Image: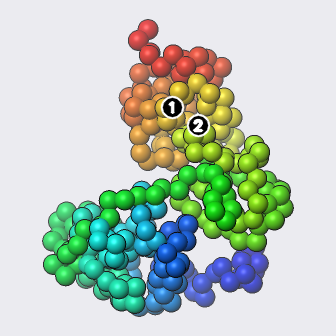
Amino acid sequence: MLDGLWDLGLLDPTPELEHKRNIIVAPVPKRGHTSDLIGGRLIARLEDLPDLPAKFGFVVDVDGPRQLANASGDIRIETSASGGIIVRADGSKLGQPVTQDDAVNAAVALARWFHKTVSPDIRRMAPHLAATPLPHCFARETVTPDTALLTPGPLTNGCAYGVPFGSMTASQLRNLMQGTGASRMRIAPNRIFILDGTPVTDTPAFVTTPDDPRMHIHACPGAPACAASTVPTRQIASTLAPHLKGRSLHVSGCAKGCAHRGGADVVAVGRDGAFDLVRNGHPWDDPQRRGIAPTDLAPRVGLMNWSD
Ligand code: SF4
């Protein structure tokens, strides 16, 4: 597989460079593909970046309203409130105004400031800013409040497809690619990818409407894929989807909660072959109900009152 990826130009020459290429670019190119242009320039400068923590990353999102407002990133090249470009440290409302030609220089300078000033126990930009003031040169203009988050559905030149639980088989993808006649694929955050070609909307393996409840469900692989789980998760999550009434759901094989670190309206946590239920919380929170058999989950979630 690595040989195949290398032949496609999808690998970096060294693990050190691969480690640094933690960059998310706006998924829908607009306004002259400026995000793609700056993202490419940033990739070309990876060797100039200092050693950064493993999850430290960059967001490039300058094609109009922010498509990546919810995406994790420590140094953000974004559209400013005045319609220009800023380089912003995550955790600060203000950024440094730049042109598209000096944006990458400013991002590298901000990465070097982080590397030079951060203490070893802090791994991300936002907690670093809580303890260390940002130099004035990096904090002069606000980011645009406008967002355009990508959701599944047809686009001008193709379609955005949601992937339930973030997992698909090779044959599902191959069949979709053949149906669309697509020649290009772009990976987007939030379990979405974009194919050019003819949109295919009647595909049960993928989500093609923004209101599909499967896009609001988190479920880890569960049993038998993970030894920590005594219950299946994704099949059960699918059976619960029609009962959610717009609420978010997290089905977790155990209290670790690998699939989603944030909260959900309904959380079902596997334990000893049954489920505990948490309302408005996380898998590791104290449950309101314990020991519900998998077959009893759907009616219980459908009630959602849990007052009995
Ligand atoms: S949440 Fe538990 S069961 Fe699910 S993948 Fe993580 S460790 Fe495994």
Q: Quadrant of residue 174?
A: bottom right
Q: Position of residue 188 (x, y in %)?
A: 57, 62
Q: Position of residue 285 (x, y in %)?
A: 38, 33
CA–CA distance in space, label 2 to label 1 = 7 Å
Q: Quadrant of residue 10?
A: bottom right
Q: Is residue 151 above or below residue 227?
A: below
Question: CB of mark 2 within 8 Å of CB of mark 1?
Answer: yes
In percent of the image, x 81 and y 65: which residue is there? 181
Does any atom of ligand 1 lie closer than 8 Å to the CB of label 2? no
**Under tag 1, what secondary structure?**
loop
Q: Is residue 42 above or below residue 144?
A: below
Q: Is residue 20 shown left or right of residue 182?
A: left
Query: Which is nearer the eye, 17 or 298?
Result: 298
- Amino acid type of the residue that numbered disc 2 sits on in the rendered structure: Pro
**Under tag 2, what secondary structure?**
helix
In the rendered structure, find residue 213 and report the number of the disc placed on it. 2
- Asked whether the viewer can see residue 122, the reply is no
Residue at the extreme top: 308
- Which residue in the structure is indicated by mark 1? 246
Q: Position of residue 134 (x, y in %)?
A: 19, 74
The quadrant the C terminus occupies is top left
Query: Which is nearer the eye, 217 or 252?
Result: 217
In percent of the image, x 41 and y 12: which residue is there? 307
